[in-house]
Amino acid sequence: MGNLLIVGTMAFDAIETPFGKTGRILGGAGTFIGLAASQFNVKSAIVSVVGDDFPQSYMDILLNKNIDLSGVEVVKGGKTFFWEGKYHNDLNSRDTLATELNTLADFNPVVPADFTNAEIVMLGNLHPNIQLSVINQMETRPKLIILDTMNFWMDHTWDELMNVISKIDVLTINDEEARQMTNEYSLVKAAAKIQKMGPRYVVIKKGEHGALLFHRENIFFAPALPLEEVFDPTGAGDTFAGGFAGYLAEAGYVSFESMKNAIIHGSNLASFCVERFGTERMVDLQKDEVEARLEQFKELTQFNIELT
Amino acid sequence: MGNLLIVGTMAFDAIETPFGKTGRILGGAGTFIGLAASQFNVKSAIVSVVGDDFPQSYMDILLNKNIDLSGVEVVKGGKTFFWEGKYHNDLNSRDTLATELNTLADFNPVVPADFTNAEIVMLGNLHPNIQLSVINQMETRPKLIILDTMNFWMDHTWDELMNVISKIDVLTINDEEARQMTNEYSLVKAAAKIQKMGPRYVVIKKGEHGALLFHRENIFFAPALPLEEVFDPTGAGDTFAGGFAGYLAEAGYVSFESMKNAIIHGSNLASFCVERFGTERMVDLQKDEVEARLEQFKELTQFNIELT
């Protein structure tokens, strides 16, 4: 069993999709990553910050998945990070209606002592200096540091982002952001440029169009499972990252072949995430459902052409 | 060796992409389908119409691939169908600058006697009544009738389109058109609705995002090969269809499994088509290049997760 250190937000989300509207529900990158990783035989911890308005019942959801929350700071009198968004009809784009950083504004991550030797570190989308601070707290160099980021940090903290990116192994990023980061439209060229910035592996997330893994000359592609209905895409990217990191932590070795499987497991879990609002589907997700859908992924992608 | 009957335009194209501009070059759906299908061990014929301005050298390109052109009518004093288009910088969208139907306006297809028993019929994008006329000329019901169409025929000849679609086995269509045809955003739902219109198989082409094959509850997906540069997308969809039809004609049997391979072969050939202007890359394409890239498709998509 490998150790997986997760750093990411724990949040309240309020979500509107064409199918309905929620009140404040459990959200945040750290939450989704943790829930996805809990599908694997790993010992994981989340480092995050919340206010004392964050209900114990939400903590319990994660604790019940055997996720270590000793690295979650609860700020007395503070309020938890809040995000409100409304998806457009195609569910591929959304408007952010509110972002209240609250306690996240002064987040100073502290890695629990048990996890300063974690083999895999998954840095969710946060200020690059927060991500860097976590790397600097590691006693031994992890086998794999995975970092997720977004355009906001490219626009506002480019130098800090480049600094932390130079120290990691895997960058996960969406297609538009990969293009913005490199000024290359071709994702093949963009991934090559990003590898020169530091990470040996680049995962480009294309939402409903799947995900690409790049490493030197090697490329692997995993489609998103075609679904009758995407109900709420919130957390799909983080669920993908959590499945990716969780699988690698359980596998205990890193190679292009193991990463292929990791990408498939990530895509598989993300296909569940989008079926209900927020974390709803992930909380009760059963192993047999996960296995059955992996079989669907095989049927979706595996073929048999003999080459001479 | 199976017989493949191809019906589609033979044309002059004038193309502008961010990489350059052509004069009038060889184009047309029938041309691209024929060139792609010629990679397989099949006896194929193109039914089409051109003016006497269509040069013998263009005919020779197809004749050298052992494509039967006895069904290509040459209209004396007539001019060949002409299309001019300019691609935007991302190469995913284009403006049509000119469309001159010329001899295509009165196209009255005549299937050569040798091909009225063809096992596979590939009906390229044309007026649905022209497509229907070809079906009606077949002496025996082909094993498989594949039909390609586009939004123009939905907008202007809906009833005729629905009539011909009710008589075919495979519809190939792009994602936006599948949505328009069914009023369903979900491609899973759209494909289910299209199957109720007639075709047992639906292939939804997503351009750089690959292609989906639907048949009852079964779904298969083939990505487009990630390329450093897409030079000119003209003909990629027809090349895909030609590879799909050509493989099935050679294989001689139709099943979901053989269609999976057909989709991969189609995607593989389309990945070459876009590397040069027009038909340039397809004309000289060698078997060993095709095989090497099929190996790339395997590496791109095949993984090894053992399920219990």
Image (spheres, coloured by chain):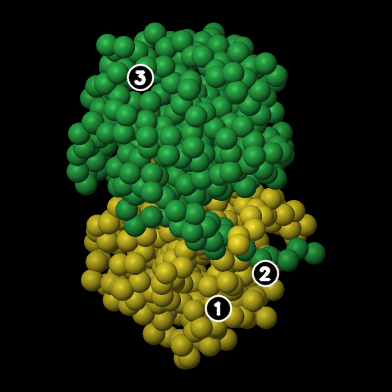
Chain colours: A yellow, B green
Would residue A57 appear left or right of B172 to someone viewing this image?
Answer: right
Chain letter, disc 2 residue? A
Residue placed most toward the observer, A141 or A214: A214
Residue sitting at x 49%, y 79%: A144
Residue B102 sits in quarter: top left
Quadrant of the drawing holding the N terminus of chain B: top right
Residue A37 % position (x, y):
61, 67
Quadrant of the drawing holding the C terminus of chain B: bottom right
Give the label, 1 or 2, closer to the camera.
1
Residue B90 % position (x, y):
29, 44
Residue A106 % position (x, y):
35, 69
Q: Secondary structure at mark 2?
A: loop
Q: Secondary structure at mark 1?
A: loop
Determine whether A262 is above or below B132 in the image. Answer: below
Circles 3 and 1, Cβ within 8 Å, touching? The answer is no
Q: Which residue carries the number 1 mark? A: A254
Q: Residues within 10 Å of mark 3 (few under 14, many from 20)?
A: many
Q: Are marks 3 and 1 on the same chain?
A: no
Residue sitting at x 51%, y 83%: A143
Checking the image for residue B103, the label placed there is none
Residue B135: in sight, yes or no? no
Chain letter, disc 3 residue? B
Q: Which residue carries the number 2 mark? A: A40
Residue placed most toward the observer, B247 or A239: B247
Q: CA distance from mark 1 to mark 2?
A: 16 Å
Residue placed most toward the observer, B21 or A143: B21
Residue placed most toward the observer, A190 or B184: A190
Q: Residues within 10 Å of mark 2 (few under 14, many from 20)?
A: many
Give the label, 3 or 1, closer to the camera.
3
Q: CA distance from mark 3 to mark 1?
A: 58 Å
Q: Which residue carries the number 3 mark? A: B50
Q: Secondary structure at mark 3?
A: strand
